[in-house]
Image: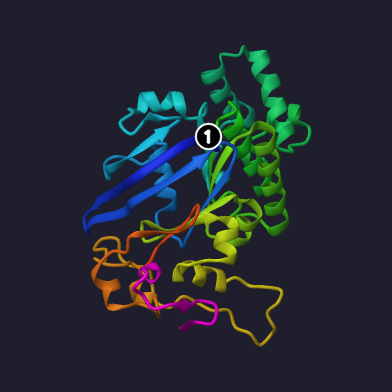
Amino acid sequence: MSERILNIENLKVSFDTYAGEVEAVRGVSFHVNKGETLAIVGESGCGKSITVQSIMKLVPMPPGRLKEGTIEYLSTDITAYSDKKMQHLRGKEMSMIFQDPMTSLNPTMRIGQQILEGVKKHTGLKKKEAEEQIIRLLTDVGIPNPDKNMLRYPHMFSGGMRQRVMIAIALACNPKILFADEPTTALDVTTQAQILELMNALKEKFGTSIVLITHDLGIVARMADRVAVMYAGKIVETGSAHDIFYTPKHPYTFGLLKSLPSMDLSKETKLEIIPGTPASLINPPKGCSFADRCKYAMNVCNRLEPPENEISQGHAGSCWLLDERAPKVDLIKGEIL
């Protein structure tokens, strides 16, 4: 059995706004095993980034508010950790690659200095040793001439190179878990492939667990061992990458897969869309949040929240169609059997 490095139970995070309480994360539970890649996927605004930022205590409170739930890292409950305590974990034990490297890097500091901050804080290395460590890191992430490039500023690099610098900063202290928040969003396809290959290589080299946040299922297919599908602040289906891609059981998961372009599609074939818009998180529906957009919705879907049903070992979903009393549905054909 794999060692569980991170365990999240019933995490609930809200934001207090002038319009009311926004329930951004509504009872999320998942775990991450040592050395694996877990992908959290879903539409923009479903709560993916807030979930991982809450784990690292990066959500400003107020207006954010951790209402409920537990966060366990290596069997230690860190839910109530203060910012001072979290500073000992951030960088050393867990790190994050943010979505936009241009806004995440300090434009007034050389990149070597920015990497040096974390190295000095958590390792206690002397300046010369720390600089040697920075050169090794920049070499690992594919930055050429690291001894010269460490003296350059962020604006002097391309988008792909800046993202490599962000990865170097995140891996500077060899963290056990790495959160990657849309790490390839602003990059061209060729650079995306290079960054993904780099992350996989570094994962193999250092044994780091990765939590990958994305809405790109192509990246998920390439990177993930397990997948958690998130919708309206909740996880609606979890399973291995094989389970999610080949035997999806939640209509939302299937809708995401059907909206992907494929080489098999003819020129006349139109991509399917998920009709409607995501549910409001200011006043979330009482029942299933996806009911208004689901063509298989039943009366119970609008009244009661679906429980999590085990489909197979490691594969579970929250949908009333998985109840033994529900009609059988063929998602591929779009028919009720």
- Location of residue 327 by image quarter: bottom left
User: Who's the residue at 33% across and 46% down the image?
Assistant: 11
- Image vertical order of residue 305 relative to residue 167, above or below: below
In the image, is residue 225 part of the stretch drawn in magenta? Answer: no
Quarter in which the N terminus is drawn:
top right
User: Who's the residue at 62% across and 32% down the image?
Assistant: 111
Q: Element under label 1?
A: loop
Residue topped by disc 1: 3
Q: Amino acid at mark 1?
A: Glu
- Image vertical order of residue 289 relative to residue 88, above or below: below
Give the crowd class for mark 1: few <14, some 14-19, many >=20 residues within 10 Å. few
Residue 157 in view: no
**Residue 59 at x, y = what percent?**
36, 41
Of residue 143 and residue 333, the one placed in the foreground of this image is 333
**Residue 278 at x, y = what percent?**
37, 68
Chief secondary structure of the magenta span? loop
Most extreme residue toward the front is 324
Most extreme residue toward the bottom is 268
- Location of residue 289 by image quarter: bottom left
User: Who's the residue at 27% across and 55% down the image?
Assistant: 22
- Region in magenta: 320-337
Of residue 215 and residue 166, the one placed in the foreground of this image is 215
User: Who's the residue at 43% across and 44% down the image?
Assistant: 52
- Image vertical order of residue 85 relative to residue 296, above or below: above
Image coloring type: rainbow
Query: In the picture provided, is 189 more to the left or to the right than 286?
Result: right
Residue 194 in view: yes
